Amino acid sequence: MKKTVKPLSQQLNRTFRKWHRKLGVFAAFFIVFLSVTGVALNHTDGLSLAHQPIKSTLLLDYYGISVPQDVRFYQQQTIQVVNNSVWLEGHLLIESDAKIVSVGQLFLKHNQQKVFVIATRQSILLYNLNGELIDMLGTESGVPEMIKAMSINNGQVIVDSADGYYQTDSDFFDWQVIQPLITPKWLQSEQASGEVIQQAELAYRAQFLTLERIIIDSHSGRILGDIGVFFMDFIALLLIVLSISGLYIWVKYTKNTRK
C-alpha cells in the first residue's frame, strides 16, 4: 500500500500550530508581566513609584546598598546623623561633604527663636525647629577650620578646632580664641536601643532603592544582571516568532475557509 505524502504547506501549518500552542503557553506569563509593568511605568507619577522606598533587606543587600557606618542621635532622638547626612524626624536636612561633628539647640536672641545648630568639620548650619535652613556659615564668615567638637552653654557656642578653642555668641558674628580653665562640656550623641538604630539604618538605605527602580529593572531584566537582559531579549524574539507563526496560521485558515 502506497504511503500518502502530505504537501509541504500542510506540514508547515501543522508544525506551526503545534509550536505556536506550546510557546504561547510559556510566553503568556511574560506577556502579562511585561504588560503590567509597562502600564505601571507609564503611570509612575500617579502611582508615586519613585517615592516608595524598598525596605526589604534582601533586595537592599542584592543591590549592594550597604549599612551606614555612622549612626548617631541628638535632641531626644528627633535628630539623626547617618554617615554625612542629618535627618529631622525622617526629613532630610542636609547631606554634607564634610563629616558631621555634632548637633545642638540654641536660642537666638536677635529673633527670639530656637534653632538647631549643626556643626560639620568646615561649617555651622542653623535650622529652625521645622527643619528650614536659616543660615550656613563657613570659614568666610569666621568659622574656624577643622572643627572637632562643639559645646552650647548659656547662649555661647564653643568649638574645638585645629587652631584651638573658639567662642561666639548667638549672633555668630565674631569668633574669638579662648583658653577656658575648665574643658567645655562637648555635645555628645545619645544612647539608643539596637532596634532604633536598625530602623534608622534601614530608613537610610531604603532611600536609595525605590519601587520604580525595581519595576524598571524587572521590566528590562536587569534585576538579574546580564543574564536577565539576555533572557528578556530571548522573550522578545519569542514573541516575534509567535506573532509570525500566528499570522501564518491565520492566513492559512482564511484561505482554507474560502475554498
Image: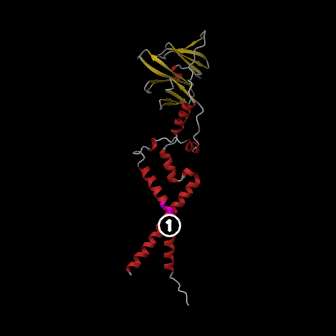
Question: What's the residue type where badge 1 is placed?
Answer: Val
- Colouring style: secondary structure
Q: Residue lying farthest left? A: 258
Q: Is residue 171 above or below residue 227?
A: above
Q: Is residue 241 above or below residue 148?
A: below
Horizontal arrangement in the rendering, residue 162 relative to residue 40 (left or right): right
How crowded pointer 1 is (Cα within 10 Å; few <14, some 14-19, many 20+) is rated as some
Q: Is residue 225 visible to the viewer in this orientation of the structure?
A: yes
- Range shown magenta: 20-28
Number of marks in picture: 1
Please say whether residue 26 is one of the residues in the magenta stretch.
yes
Residue 176 position, x and y percent, is 55, 13
Residue 55 position, x and y percent, is 52, 40
Q: Going 54% across and 61% down the picture, which residue do you hit?
A: 234
- Residue nearer the viewer, 246 or 168: 246
Residue 51 position, x and y percent, is 45, 41
Which quarter of the image is occupied by the C terminus?
bottom left
Q: Is residue 91 above or below residue 187?
A: below
Q: Is residue 137 visible to the viewer in this orientation of the structure?
A: no
**Where is mark 1, residue-wise?**
241
Write down the quadrant of residue 146 in the picture.
Answer: top right
- Tell me the SS state at disc 1: helix
- Residue nearer the viewer, 169 or 241: 241
Residue 75 position, x and y percent, is 50, 23
Q: Going 56% across and 31% down the picture, which residue do you hit?
A: 197
Which quarter of the image is occupied by the N terminus?
bottom right
Q: In this view, does 9 lie above or below 80?
A: below
